[in-house]
Amino acid sequence: MSLKHALLGFINYGPMTGYELKKFFDTSVAHFWNAELSQIYPALKAMESEGLVEMKVEVQDDRPNRKVYSITESGRRELVDWLAKPADRDQVREPILIKVFFGSSLSKQASGNLRSTAGSRYTLPSSNGPTTLSVRLRPPMAPSLNTGTPRTAKLRCAP
């Protein structure tokens, strides 16, 4: 997902300032998408140049003027076209999964604690009982680490 499309989605709800957009990010989608003001304002300026949004200045007597952005028809078409396309698979980086990958270096008890933590964080679909996620690991490319034997990492997840 691009920041441009996320901003278009929010502005499609109604006109907003950059600060209001940041608040929307923080209170609605922050658990899977984050944006800082330092990213939002340049994106809004670029989107204005592309004709996707319009900016109007609201003059305020007792405060700094507000720049309020609204979506244009071109912006709405861009948003709808983007929503209709299949989503790209983004690369997921999960620290707990890299720990599971290298977990064989831990003692049996510590390894069990790690698997328990990971298993409670990930729930896989299952019709009867817990599911075991098995990942076959190829030997590392570094010759000094290559034992020649593929390993399997198993993660037991709650139903």
Image (spheres, helix red, strand yellow):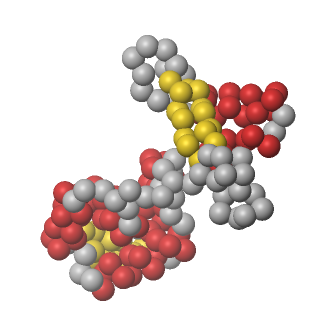
Q: Residue furthest front?
A: 148
* Residue 7 position by quadrant: bottom left
> Nearest the camera: 125 or 85?
125
Residue 155 position within the rendered picture, expressed as x and y whole percent measured from the top left: 60, 32
Residue 50 position within the rendered picture, expressed as x and y whole percent measured from the top left: 27, 83
Residue 14 position within the rendered picture, expressed as x and y whole percent measured from the top left: 28, 59
> Nearest the camera: 87 or 62?
87
Q: Residue furthest top?
A: 128
> On the picture, is 94 further left or further right than 143?
left
> On the picture, is 48 further left or further right than 152?
left
Q: Which quadrant would the N terminus be assigned to in this image?
A: bottom left
> Nearest the camera: 2 or 76?
2
Q: Does residue 96 sit above or below 93 in this rendering?
A: above
* Residue 75 position by quadrant: bottom left
Q: Does residue 31 sit above or below 144 in this rendering?
A: above
> Nearest the camera: 103 or 72?
103
Kindly identify the residue that appears in the image at 65 percent across and 46 percent down.
149
Kindly identify the residue that appears in the image at 64 percent across and 42 percent down.
151
